Image (cartoon, rainbow, N blue to C red):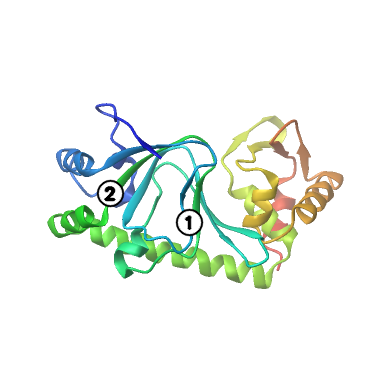
Amino acid sequence: MTTSAERPGDLCVSRVPLFQGLTYDQQVEVAGVARPTHLDRAEQVYSAGEDVSQLMVVHTGRVKIARTSSDGHEQIIRVLGPGDFIGESAFLTGIRPDHTATALEDAQLCVFDHGDLGRLVEKHTSIGLRMLQGVSRRLGEAEARLAAVISSDVSSRLADYLLALPAQSRSEGHIDVVLPLAKKDIASLLDTTPESLSRQLRALSDAGVIVQGSGSRITIADADALSALATDT
């Protein structure tokens, strides 16, 4: 993990909901406290149990947050993109992480030491409020994911995942989406196996609901059928 310079006018903090309650001048002040950091693809940011006394904001690239079981199975919790951050739980509770953070691709982070972050929260109370809102939102997402695992099957979770991806409309009502992760990582996010995910994609293709294109591109040919499947518990 190496430090790097940040271009004027391209403030990392301006993308982050945590700091969007601040004026531009205040954001410049906050950015001056941050340490711009570069990550290479597959570089580990930190591991489970490590003393992480930093808030890390993703500026560019993606970082996966995952837990590894005793038998070596990796379970991806979430994937952070530009504007997302990690390390606020350790700041609020002092508890060491039970997960690892690894760059999925070359990435730029803005890193705040917890001591500096504490002084910023004291000076700008909106940061602390938005941090708590972020923690509450993640808790809600975790509860929703748990409920989905308990109450729905893999096909429903896959349908919901595909419908949530950024989409580009085409003629005849078709919709193009691009899978943002490797299929093994998507399987981990959906709490299933790569083999099961492949079977479900093939079943949707055979039913004419989707068309699997080259690479990671998928065309949703029947959005109504996919929506019905997503809500089927």
Does residue 37 lie above or below 223 as drawn? above
Numbered disc total: 2
> Residue at 29% across / 42% down in the picture?
13
Instruction: Residue 82: give x, y in percent of width and height.
Output: 42, 41
Res 215 → quadrant: top right
Residue 227, visible in the rendered structure:
no
Instruction: Residue 132: give x, y in percent of width and height.
Output: 31, 64
Classify 10 Å Cα crowding around label 2: few (below 14), some (14-19), many (20 and above). Answer: many
* Nearest to the observer: residue 205 or residue 223: 205
Q: Residue furthest left?
A: 123
Q: Earlier in the sequence, mark 1 or mark 2?
A: 1
> Residue at 30% across / 66% down in the picture?
92
* Nearest to the observer: residue 85 or residue 224: 85
Circle 1/circle 2 CB separation < 8 Å: no
Q: Mark 2 points at which residue?
A: 112
Q: Mark 1 points at which residue?
A: 47
> Residue at 84% across / 50% down in the picture?
203
Question: Which disc is residue 121 wearing?
Answer: none
Instruction: Answer left or right for 78 relative to 134.
Output: right
Q: What residue type is labelled 1?
A: Ser
The answer for how far apart the CA atoms under marks 1 and 2 are is 18 Å
> Residue at 48% across / 36% down in the picture?
40
* Nearest to the observer: residue 228 or residue 203: 203
Does residue 151 lie above or below 200 as drawn? below
For numbered disc 1, what is the local secondary structure? loop
* Nearest to the observer: residue 74 or residue 155: 74
For numbered disc 2, what is the local secondary structure? strand
Instruction: Residue 115: give x, y in percent of width and height.
Output: 21, 57
Instruction: Answer left or right for 102 relative to 31.
Output: right
Instruction: Answer left or right for 140 relative to 130.
Output: right
Q: Quadrant of the N terminus?
A: top left
Q: Which amino acid does label 2 sit on?
A: Phe
